Amino acid sequence: MRLIELDGVNFNYGSGQPWIFRDLDFRLESGSCHCITGPTGSGKSTLLQLIAGLLSRPFEGGVFRRQGLLTGLVMQDPQVQLLRQTVGAEVAFALENLALATEQMIPMVQRALRRVGLFVSLDCPISNLSLGQKYRLMMAAQLVCNPTVLLLDEPWAQLDDRGVEELIMVIRGLVADGIAVVISEHNPRSFDGLVDHFWQLADGQLKPGIYRTQHAIPLKAMSCGDEVIVDTDSFDYRFVGDSPLFSCEQPLQVRRGELVTLIGDNGAGKSSLMKSLAGIQSNTVALPIRVFGERPKAGAYGARLGLLMQRPVRQLFENSVLDEISFSLKRFELPLENAAALLQDLGLEAFAKQSPHKLSYGQQHLVALASLVCYQPQLLLLDDPMAGLDAEYFDRFCLMVNRLRERGTAVIVSSHRPLRQLPVSQQWDIADGMLTVSYALEEAYYAS
């Protein structure tokens, strides 16, 4: 049964804005699974929102047929969809609007949470969840009402490997029940064997196949300096009143120019540790951590430290991309002409006058990164910076990191999975409640 049909659809966000889709065709049948890939900023998220019925009708022609469907959409940043304070209340929100009795809702909410592998109390505060766990929560909030169509925006970037495996199992069951699934994804091969139709979105149109670009700018293996930027004693990482989230039984050290990766599953504590290094994580027991020889404290390091948060939108507040980067330059009394040069290096010069809040998730990551890179911190903390980046933009990310490390910046990068294309000197793994360290890893390389 055909559920959605787009014929020759043209779409943009208003008069004078560039066209996002031109003569775009797409058909969605019940029980089918589609995966859409394409360059960062090509319109994948916009297409999902259009299919979900969240955007106004296309401009200047095109036919959009959509049956009376119940559609569930999990956005690339699930944080923007959250409405309630606790896990149970969030999943039950749609059921409350249907006026179901509480005794009916509770088993439905529990079943939806189990379906996505989120085993937490219904009273658990959402603020206690990691971004990946929030993605699972938002999936449960959509599935609780048994939608006809489920739309997932970049799930691989937000979920750890176990979460991706669980997601694949969930999608298999949904498709078997006749539910149609559409996935927007930069890593489509993760869903091989599940997807019926692969599409690439480029130049405003959908074409069969998978979008690919060649890596061109590998990260360099570099020697490290003698200066110690970060050092710790052994420690238990825990929040006040809680049992340890993880323990580290060996001292940690990061030297000038080092590239370190921090690997762990959703909820392991990666983002919390990064914030602790920056001195902005509250409600934790005192830790024997020293950054530049001092106990971490918010605002204590000035231009010496930069933190890229997992949600880049939290660091973007100016009216234009150029103003965003210029703000950091003004703050530290650096030449303003550096902003335009940096935008050119990142391939973002066309967006200089646009609001950073109107860019794609991946482009926002790059703008937030540029606002840190421009003042050349001595320690750069990057919390899952690759989310939303295609291969071309990943190359530009490597270009920025190369330049900083050549000038002695130490870089710590967190991720759900090992980044085998990076020539790291240390890998910190958080698993089974322990943080362990691997040293002198083999020099990484790119696979075409």
Image: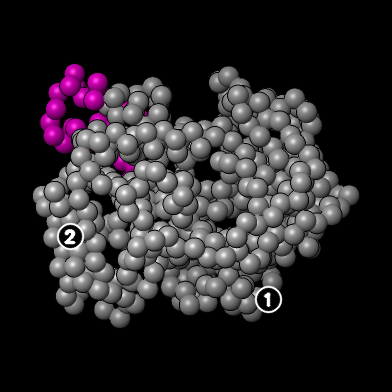
At label 1, which amino acid type do we have? Pro
Callout 1 touching callout 2 (CB < 8 Å):
no
Disc nearest the viewer among 1 and 2:
2
Q: Percent from the top left, x then y, of residue 277?
A: 67, 42
From what the image shows, is residue 50 above or below residue 347?
A: above
Mark earlier in primary sequence (1, 2): 2
Residue at the (51%, 37%) spot, across then down: 161
Q: Percent from the top left, x then y, of residue 265?
A: 54, 34
Q: Is residue 390 magenta?
A: no
Q: Percent from the top left, x then y, of residue 91?
A: 29, 33
Task: Pick the residue in front: 417 or 208.
Answer: 208
Task: Pick the residue in front: 109 or 374.
Answer: 109
Determine the main secondary structure of the stretch shown in magenta: helix
From what the image shows, is residue 287 above or below residue 192?
A: above
Magenta-tinted stretch: 79-108
Question: Is residue 58 something that shows in the picture?
Answer: no
Tag 1 secondary structure:
loop
From what the image shows, is residue 161 above or below residue 13?
A: above
Q: Which residue is mark 1?
A: 335
Q: Quadrant of the C terminus?
A: bottom right
Task: Pick the residue in front: 186 or 351.
Answer: 186
Residue at the (80%, 56%) spot, across then down: 222
Q: Residues within 10 Å of mark 1 (few under 14, many from 20)?
A: few
At label 2, which amino acid type do we have? Glu
Q: Percent from the top left, x then y, of residue 320?
A: 47, 71
From what the image shows, is residue 167 above or below residue 24?
A: above
User: Which residue of the protein is positioned furthest toward the left in this rendering?
Assistant: 68
Question: Is residue 262 something that shows in the picture?
Answer: yes
Residue at the (69%, 55%) spot, across then down: 445
In this image, 243 relative to 286: left or right? Answer: left
**Cα gap from disc 1 to disc 2, whole angstroms:** 52 Å
Q: Which residue is mark 2?
A: 5
